[in-house]
Image (tube, rainbow, N blue to C red):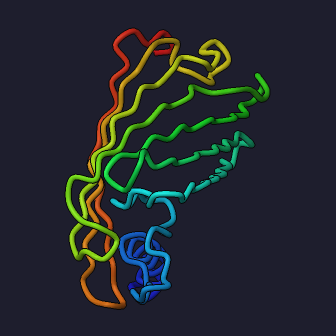
Amino acid sequence: MRGERDQKRHPLFMAVFLLTFHFSPLTSQAIQDNSFLLEEAYNQESGVVQHISSFTRSSGGAWGYSFTQEWPLGGIRHQLSYTVPIQHTNPTGTGLGDIALNYRYQLAGTPEARTLIAPRLSLLLPTGNERMGRGSGGLGFQGNLPVTLVLSPQWTTHWNAGATVTPSARNV
């Protein structure tokens, strides 16, 4: 019985481990900001625009897709981005969710650093239809503090702490 229970925990442990740490040798040609499902503390370098797509699907058939585009503002210190979500819920169908306009400041670190910190502030625009379950119905604000630690040339870890506030939400 105990061995069966340990086998069920093993995939969960591996998933948490793989989401917390990722293997990436750091060389001058390596792309460092390639974490999946976690926000890293890397802003884009001058002349580099990053495109990020994400898709999730629940067992009930609802799904969500988002597209984010990150743009540097004159260098690595400041970055603007936007996120456009498309959501599908049953039985209301598919439509636009609440769009996010994001600003990130590279507080500490460069792509070669061992410790990087890049706080993000976001304005959440009520573009989704709250009656259809695709938006909050009010203007929102979000803050996130991603911290990236390069533990060795082979191991990097990303940590996130954040909060979202939507004072006039109507979909509660």
> Is 55 on the left-hand or right-hand side of 16?
right
Q: Residue at x 53, y 57 (%)?
A: 47
Q: Residue at x 39, y 54 (%)?
A: 75
Does residue 167 sit above or below 27 in this rendering? above
> Is 95 on the left-hand or right-hand side of 49?
right
In the picture, which quadrant includes the N terminus? bottom left
| Quarter of image, res 73 | top left
Does residue 135 sit above or below 6 in this rendering? above
Q: Residue at x 47, y 84 (%)?
A: 7
Q: Please tell me which residue lies in front, 143 or 59.
A: 143
| Quarter of image, res 85 | top right
Query: Residue 71: x, y in percent?
Result: 51, 47
| Quarter of image, res 164 | top left
Does residue 170 sit above or below 80 in this rendering? above
> Is 38 on the left-hand or right-hand side of 68?
left
Q: How many marks?
A: 0
Query: Residue 63: x, y in percent?
Result: 69, 42
Q: Residue furthest front?
A: 74
Q: Residue at x 35, y 44 (%)?
A: 104
Does residue 105 sit above or below 124 in this rendering? below
Query: Residue 70: x, y in percent?
Result: 52, 48
